[in-house]
Structure formats: C-alpha cells, structure tokens
Amino acid sequence: MLRLLIEKELRDIIGSTKFTTTFAVCAILILLAFYVGARNYQVSMNEFEAARSENLRQMEELTNWNEVDHRIFLEPQPLAALVSGISNDIGRTVDVETRGELSSENSRFNEDPIFAVFRFLDLQFIFTVVLSLFAILFGFDAINGEKERGTLRLSFANSVPRDKYILGKLVGSFLALVIPLLLAVLVGFLLLVVMGIPMDGGLWARLGLIVLSGLMYFGVFLTLSVFISTLTEHSSTSFLLLLVAWIFAVLIIPRTAVLLSGRAVDVPSMDQINYEKATLENELWDQDRKQMSEFWRSNPPSENESREESMARFRRFMSELADAREEEQQKLAEQLNENRRNREFVQQKLALNIARVSPTASFALASSDLAGTSLELKQRFVESANLYQQTYATFVNEKTGGMGGGWWSRMNSDEEADPIDPYELPVYEYVEPETSEFINGALPDMALLMVFNLLFFAGAFVRFLKYDVR
Amino acid sequence: MESKNQPMLQAIDLSKRYEDGHLALDNLNLTVETGQVYAMLGGNGAGKTTAINLFLNFIEPTTGQAVVDGIVTHEEPLKAKERIAYVSENVMLYPNFTALQNVDFFVKLGGKTKYTKEDYRKVLLRVGLQEEAHDRRLKGFSKGMRQKCGIAIAILKDAKAILLDEPTSGLDPKAAFEFIHLLNTLREEGKAILMSTHDIFRAKEVADIVGIMNLGKLVMQRTKDELVGEDLEKLYVEFMAGYMDEVA
C-alpha cells in the first residue's frame, strides 16, 4: 500500500508540466552554480598566485629587509566558490609588519562592488531561495488540492489507512523532487572534477554534507507545505500562507535577528576603538619626545666616547623607548580588541540564536560552517596572520640584526648594500582546520533542520488523521 | 458479525447532526439485500449524499449505525470499505495519468492486485470507453468519460456493495442507457447497489426499491412491485409537497 502511494506520488509529480518546467530551471541553476563557482575558483587562484608573485617581485629591488612591504594573501578555498558565506566580505590581504596590530583588507566586494549589490549565484542561494520556493510550489496543495480535485474522496472510499496515505504523500513528494535534483547535483560534482578543482576526501565529505543539509532544508519547506495544506480548506489559502511564511523565514527573521541583537548588545565601533588607540599613542609620543629632547642633556657624551658610540647609545635608548611605547600600545589595543571581540561574540551569538527560529538561518549557518566560510573565517585568517607575524619578525630580526626603525638605519647607512632575496622569506600558508572541526560546527544546525522536519511532519501527520476528506 | 443471511447494506436509526446544529439525516432506516438496487430520490439537501458519506465513514453518525455486510462502518471503517465500491457524481481522477494508469492505481488501492492491463481494457470497453482513450491522459476527458472510468474502477474492485452518488448526471442518454443496462448486470452478479439520484425515470427503470428523501428524512419507500401502475413522478411531487406541508 505504502509503495503504491509513493509510486503514485512520484508518477503524478514527475508527469506534470509544472515539474518539467521547474526542474529544468532548477537543474540549470544548480549546474550554473557549480560552473560559475569552479570558474571563480580558477580565476581567484590565478589572481592569488599573481598577487603573491608580484609582492615578491616588488621586493627584488630592495636592499634592506626593513623596507620590505610584505603582504600575505588568503588562498581561495574550493568550497567557498560554492557557498561563499562571508568569504567575499572579508579582507583577503594582510600587510605584515614585524610589530603592531594586523588587519585584513581588500575584500572581493571592495574590489568588485557590483557583486555586493546582487551577490553571487552560489549553491547556498539556490537552496535558500529557489529550492525552498520549489518545495512550496509542489507541496502547497498536497492535501487540500486533492480534496478540491475530488481524488481524496475516491481514494478514501477504499480501505486506505490515513497514516500510510500521509506518509506515502510526504515520502513520494520528497523523492519525486529530490532524486532529479540530486542528478543535477551529481553532474555538478562531475563538473568540479572535469574543471580540475582540487578536491580531497575531506572536501568531498563536506560538500556532500552541504548537499545533505540543503536537502534537509528543502524537506523543511516541503513538510511545512504539506502541514499547511492539511490545516487549510483551499489551496489558494495555503499558498498565500506559505508565501508569507517563506518571506518571514528567508527575508525577515534573519535580518530582524541582527537588528534585535544589535539593540540588545552594544559593541564599540572600530572608530571608537581607533580613537582611543590614537589618543594613547599621542600621549605616549608626547612623553617620549620630552625624554628624547632631554637625552643629551641628561646623558651627555663622555670625553672618550666616539661619535658612533654615542649614536649607538642613542639608538639603544630610542629602541627601548619604542619597545616600551609599543608594549603600552599593544596592551591597550589588546584590551580594547578583546573587549570588542567579547561583546561582538555575545552579539553574534544572540543574533544567530534568534535567527535560528528560521530554518533558512540554520541552513545558511550549517552550509557556511561546512564550506569554511562562516563568521570564523575572518578570525581564523587574522589569527593565522598573527602567528605568521611572529615567524616573520624573527626572520627580519635575524636579517637586520635586531635593528628596528628602518628610517633610522637607512639614514645612518652609507654603505652600498646587496639586494635582498625575497624568496628567503618564510612562506605563509593558510591552513584550514580538520574536516571534523567543520562538521562538528555544522552539526547543531543540521540537527535543528532535522527537528524542523520532524515537527512539521508530525504536525501534518496528526492533522491528517482527523482531516475531513469529503 | 458477518453473515451470508445479513443484508449487505443497512442504515439503522442513522442520524447526522453537524456541529452548526443542522440535522442532515434524521433517523434513516433502510436495507439493501444482495442482488438488489435501492434508489434514493430527493432534491438537493435531502440527505442522500450524507447517507452515502456515512456508509463510507467520511463522517461519523450522531446516532445509529451504517452497516456493511454486518460491519458497523464507524467501528471498523477499513474492513467495511473493503466491501464497498463507490462512484461519485463527478468522478475526479489524476489528470496527469492515462485512463489505464488511473484505473490501475485505484483498483490496486482497493486491494485488487491480480489484474492485467488486458483486464482493465476489457472492463473499460464494457463501460463504453473507446479503446483509443485508454492510453490518453485524463486531462482532455469529458465528465462522461471520467464517469465511465469511475464505473470501471468500481466494477474491477469487485466489491459486494456499490454506492453510486448521482451516477448518471454527467452521462449522455446513450451512455445513461448503457449504464442502466450495466447496473442490471451487476445486480444479476449479486451486488447490492445503493444509488442516489434525481432521475425518477431511471430510478423506476432499474431499482428494486425506491426511497424518497426530504430534509434528511426517508418520507416514502416502495418496492418495484408496489410501484407497478403507479406514477412515480406524481408520487415524488406529492410526497415532497406533503412533507413540506407537514413541516410547515
């Protein structure tokens, strides 16, 4: 009986003109997302290689390591091309200095602002917007439509258990819509291989889970549609209700969550923090200038001290001052940054938890977690840049003999120096965390999607047991 | 409780009052034996369809019982429905399926899985659906053609009892004539048939018992023999008017 009902549903959906048209559009969009994603990855990789080489080439002329304007770049990630997350919003370049705070700049949207206006056509967009509407389009009249057409009455003139009927309806609709979509996704996978995107086992596993969460998200809208169709008499009413639900889930709740958390938790702006940092810097500079101007008065050169010796003493003094100033500045910067980070974390957590009322937010978070393009990407990149900064500082110190302050050394160097070899620089490599870390991050949201599915399924099931089939 | 001596269809003090207080069926008592055709006549809102809905357990009775082959429908609905085939006034099937696919689905849903395509074709031809229509999608079918498919499904279900709700309403005169002929054959095969209809002439032609219903009540019941020499149309009008006067 259940098999018969599932087969009927499969045949009824796949045989409809509505399905042929909608499926063709969705399949093209899915393939397009894979193709565009793969192309974007190739282009980004070329740009990344070119930018890295150009940065090294610019250093070839230099003779002093202190003059080096060294940049590190975030290597494009294959999955970021399919689920862009925040990867286009964050800076992909960091100017590395031997000391001081690092920040990322030059985001994709900064370079190509037009993409910020319309965003990218990625897999996440197709699932979030297109396929959720696809699910509604096929589920809104699942039960009340059959009643309107009169087929429900004829079916229940037979000894059909209601639980089997609703189960068959849900399973049949899900399979009828998901199997053809999976075929398009599989062709997309093939496209990645053909286009030479470097996918290892971990990346395939994560991509598989992204598709799985997409299907779970699709299931949420399908079960919701069937549930609403059991609650309403007319298919026009259920369609309207589902459109309202879709607008809230996809457009309103995630945005409102950010607004609400912004109201609830106050995070100091970067301008505010920079102002505080600048104020301290000015104060410290004033103090240091006073000490500098008093240096020769309180430490005059002794008679048997040569000019070079007294200059060396002065340089040491300046270096100590700079170190102390730097330490003080860093302490405050760390304090301010940590405070901002903590508040930002609380705000983000609150925003995400509110947004999770909507399955769209859960899917967006799960898929970007799996693709490695979630909010943590920026933090991971900056943290990895900070780690590299230490290696880089050690390297430069070794090369310069600890002579900081490039302008000072340049001013006092009369010798013709040999050009530096920039290829000696320690290589920066952005290392992604383990696959399990990405999966663990996505699991709570995937579980939430499952809960949504079960909730709406249970709603449809219970409601249909008492449904008036006349 | 099933027994060969029991009536196939039986309404015992059957009443239905809806939640809004409307009394749709008032204490209906009727019996349809094996090999009998019972025609329920009456205007719109007379309670004919409510009675059929109660036999199909689409609604629960307020009081009384609808019994099919000894099975009380609201107590064991699935078991009772195994013994019923149903044809509605406006048979609606799946428009994306062909006639054969629709027949196949609904017949299997009715528990009959042994039939071949040829069996389906034979029955479709028997009910008057041309062979060229068997493999066509239902989208372009007229009401009469759909009705024929519905009747074919009911025949193939091979149930002991058949419920027909205005079965000839969409049929042209020729098809209606053939349908009446078909009902006679089904009766001869031992089916118990309960039919609701507006068509007095067809009712008189085919029914073994005619019941006239008005405002939820069975106001008259006559056997075929009792109707010999009677003008059923006149009786219908008289009973409807008389009952209306009584109510007034």
Image (tube, coloured by chain):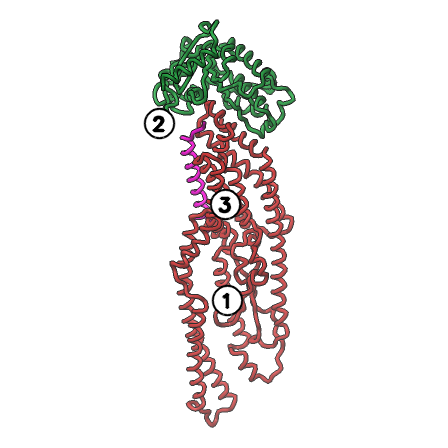
- Pointers 3 and 2 in contact (CB under 8 A)? no
Q: Residue at x 59, y 69 (%)?
A: A424
Question: Which of these two is toward me, A401 or B202?
Answer: B202
Q: Which residue is mark 2?
A: B21
Q: Quadrant of the C terminus of chain A?
A: top left
The Cα–Cα distance between marks 3 and 2, rounded to whole angstroms, is 50 Å
Q: Is residue A359 visible?
A: yes
- Chain coloured green: B
Is residue B241 positioned above or below A391 on the image? above
Category of crowding for the residue at label 3, using alpha-carbon neighbours closer than 10 angstroms: few (below 14), some (14–19), many (at least 20): many
What numbered label is drawn on residue A103?
1
Q: Which residue is mark 3?
A: A213
The amino acid type of the residue labelled 1 equals Ser
Q: Position of residue A165 (x, y in %)?
A: 47, 29
Tell me the mark number nearer the camera, choosing from 2 and 1. Answer: 2
Q: Position of residue B8 (x, y in %)?
A: 43, 13
The Cα–Cα distance between marks 2 and 1, rounded to whole angstroms, is 74 Å
Q: Residue at x 47, y 23 (%)?
A: A157
The amino acid type of the residue labelled 2 equals Gly
